[in-house]
Image (tube, rainbow, N blue to C red):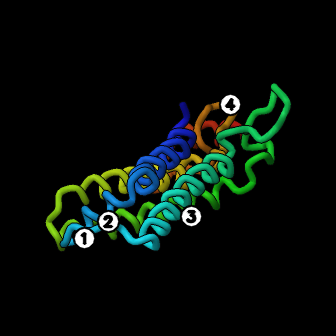
Amino acid sequence: MDVYYFYSYGTAAWLTLQAAPLIASPTMIVTLLSPEVREATPLEVYFSRCLGLSLITVGILNVLLTGSVPLSSRLGATTSDDDPKAPYALPTLTVTSLFHAAYAFYAYGLWTQTGIFSFSFAVAGSGILCTIALWCILFASSNGRISRKTGADKRTSGFPFKNNEADKRKAGKKH
């Protein structure tokens, strides 16, 4: 599986994992967060379930907009770089990486302020996904200019070392 698809499905799974308790038992979440034991108000239940459904929606949109799932009825449909089936892949990747970065920093702040070890899981999960997203933005989003003859990337230079073999070939062609 490609790293790009791993990130897309990993983000959807991470957001769904966070949304499940918000949707299933908002009363338990309120009880865990409140200093006194009490029932959740209808407004707290509404906001909890709304946040959970929003997280699932963002995860599904991430998978669809990155082109991980071909949105075509043809069986031979693929999602290649030349095929414009996923024109929003890079912007979606950028926005979700910013989300994971902000979430990881926020969870880290809560972890250092409160000392609750559970926040470290949020830091690790979102931090790993943010790192993978940044890697995809930097390295997996552009086509390298690979030479058909040598198989080397044409964007590299000889600075600060000289390429004597290339200089010999150039000198041989001039004569």
Q: Label 2 crowding class (10 Å Cα cut-off): few <14, some 14-19, many 20+?
A: many
* Amino acid at dot 3: Val
Tell which circle, 4 or 2, labels the residue nearer the N-terminal end: 2
Tell which circle, 3 or 2, labels the residue nearer the N-terminal end: 2
Q: Nearer the viewer, mark 3 or mark 2?
A: 2
Tell which circle, 1 or 3, labels the residue nearer the N-terminal end: 1
Q: Position of residue 131 (x, y in %)?
A: 41, 53
State the separation of the CA atoms marked 4 and 2: 64 Å
Q: Are marks 1 and 2 in contact (CB under 8 Å)?
A: yes
Quadrant location of the N terminus in the rendered image: top right
* Amino acid at dot 4: Lys
Q: Label 1 crowding class (10 Å Cα cut-off): few <14, some 14-19, many 20+?
A: few
Q: Secondary structure at mark 4?
A: loop
Quadrant location of the C terminus in the rendered image: top right
Q: Which mark is residue 149?
A: 4
Q: Are marks 4 and 3 in contact (CB under 8 Å)?
A: no
Q: Secondary structure at mark 3?
A: helix
Q: Nearer the viewer, mark 4 or mark 2?
A: 2
> Is residue 164 or residue 133 the one in the foreground?
133
Q: Are marks 3 and 2 in contact (CB under 8 Å)?
A: no
* Amino acid at dot 2: Val
Q: How many marks?
A: 4
Residue that badge 3 annotates: 95
State the separation of the CA atoms marked 1 and 3: 32 Å
In this view, which residue lies farthest toward the right?
74
Residue that badge 1 annotates: 34
